[in-house]
Amino acid sequence: MAKAHRKNTISEQLFPSPNAGQDTTLKTKGNFVNLKYLQEVGCNNAEFITEMITLVLQQTPENIKTLYYHTENQDWVNLKKSVHKMRSAATLVGVEELHTLINLVETYSARQVHLELLPILTNDLVRIWHKVLIELTEILNDLKSDNT
């Protein structure tokens, strides 16, 4: 039986994993999210950090739906606006890969160039966000259990 060859996504080409070839589907705490910025801004206030993580967890799924909608409808102007809304959340969670993809989607959609890449970039962005949301949920649960 022939081994299936999986084509690398653009984000995998931009950010080659040290674990390339290994199954890294569900990365958890410590692999994506870096709360250093959030801790600095919030002066290590657990309540503030909890509120910000909760806000990201509440808003991101709807933002993801909007990204898919605008990509599917090739509405590049609104795709740029929608992905821009994710920039501050990406800063809060400290995931550089998100910033790189957000920059690409914003630039390509604004300039109306490389439009064939936008669905791929959007999928890569969403894939990373899903992993980040899983990790944030775990962090939030830890924060809540530490406060009880």
Image: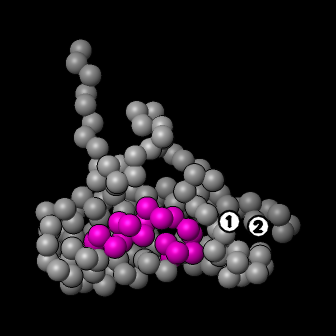
Residue 140 numbered tag: 1
Q: Secondary structure at mark 2?
A: helix
Instruction: Please give the residue where the numbered disc 2 appears in the rendered image.
Output: 144
Question: Is residue 55 at least partly visible in the picture?
Answer: yes
- Quadrant of the image occupied by residue 106: bottom left
* Side (left or right) of 20 relative to 58: left
Q: Secondary structure at mark 1?
A: helix
How many numbered marks appear? 2
* Point 28% across, 53% down: residue: 10
Badge 1 amino acid: Leu
> Is the residue under label 2 in contact with that under label 1 (CB below 8 Å)?
yes
> Between residues 136 and 111, which one lies in front from this camera angle?
111
Say if 84 sits above or below 99 in the image.
Answer: below
* Side (left or right) of 49 relative to 121: right
Q: Residue furthest top?
A: 1
* Point 35% across, 49% down: residue: 12
The x, y position of residue 117, in whole percent, is 19, 62
Specify the principal SS of the magenta part: helix
* Point 14% across, 77% down: residue: 112
* Point 51% across, 45% down: residue: 26
* Side (left or right) of 93 relative to 25: right
The magenta stretch spans residue 113: no
- Quadrant of the image occupied by residue 134: bottom right
Question: Is residue 49 at least partly visible in the picture?
Answer: no
Badge 2 amino acid: Lys
> Between residues 140 and 29, which one lies in front from this camera angle?
29
The x, y position of residue 125, in whole percent, is 36, 63
Which stretch appears magenta? 89-105
